[in-house]
Amino acid sequence: MHTPDDANRSCGPSAAQPELVLVTRTGCHLCVAARATVAAVAEELGLAWQERSLDDDAVLAGRFAEEVPVVLVNGVQRDFWTIDPQRLRRILLALREPPAG
């Protein structure tokens, strides 16, 4: 699970474990709320997640400078600014379901 000490540690995705990343920046009040939302949903679903800061990554800063916080699931932007816990939960649960057929 994510803790403040492992904020930049990477966890690779798998079929049962989607890669969940919260992109933040220092001094961002929306990021505080987003961190709590992502942490709660991830804990509820038993998922690991990571936090990456625009302050430390020029590529992320160029891509998301005006949209932080941003939630990425398996590298795809799924939400930004105000993170909706129900939407995040639905996305993550859908990725855990086995393919039909």
Image (cartoon, grey):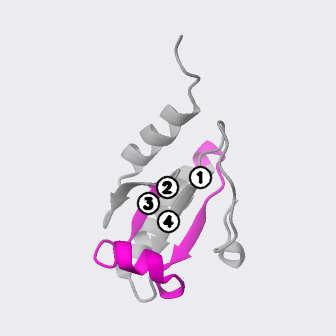
Q: Which residues are magenta?
A: 44-72
Residue shown at 56% from the left, 60% from the top: 39
Count of labels in the image = 4
Q: From the top left corner, tell me how far across and down residue 85 is, in percent.
A: 41, 51
Label 1 Cα crowd, 10 Å radius (few <14 / some 14-19 / many 20+):
many
Is the C-beta separation of discs 2 and 1 under 8 Å?
yes
Q: Which mark is residue 19?
A: 1
Q: Which mark is residue 71?
A: 3
91 w.r.t. 20: above or below: above
Q: From the top left corner, tell me how far across and down residue 36 is, in percent.
A: 49, 65
Q: Which mark is residue 22?
A: 4
Label 3 Cα crowd, 10 Å radius (few <14 / some 14-19 / many 20+):
many
Report the Cα–Cα distance between label 2 and label 1: 7 Å
Q: Secondary structure at mark 3?
A: strand
Residue type indicated by callout 4 = Leu
Residue shown at 45% from the left, 75% from the top: 60
Q: Earlier in the sequence, mark 3 or mark 4?
A: 4
Q: Secondary structure at mark 4?
A: strand
Residue type indicated by callout 1 = Glu
Tell me if 81 is positioned left or right of 32 in this view.
left
Q: From the top left corner, tell me how far across and down residue 69 is, in percent.
A: 39, 70
Report the Cα–Cα distance between label 1 and label 3: 10 Å
Q: Secondary structure at mark 2?
A: loop
Q: Which mark is residue 98?
A: none
For the C terminus, the image quarter is top right
Residue type indicated by callout 3 = Val
Residue on which the image places disc 2: 75
Q: Secondary structure at mark 1?
A: loop
Residue type indicated by callout 2 = Gly
82 w.r.t. 84: above or below: below
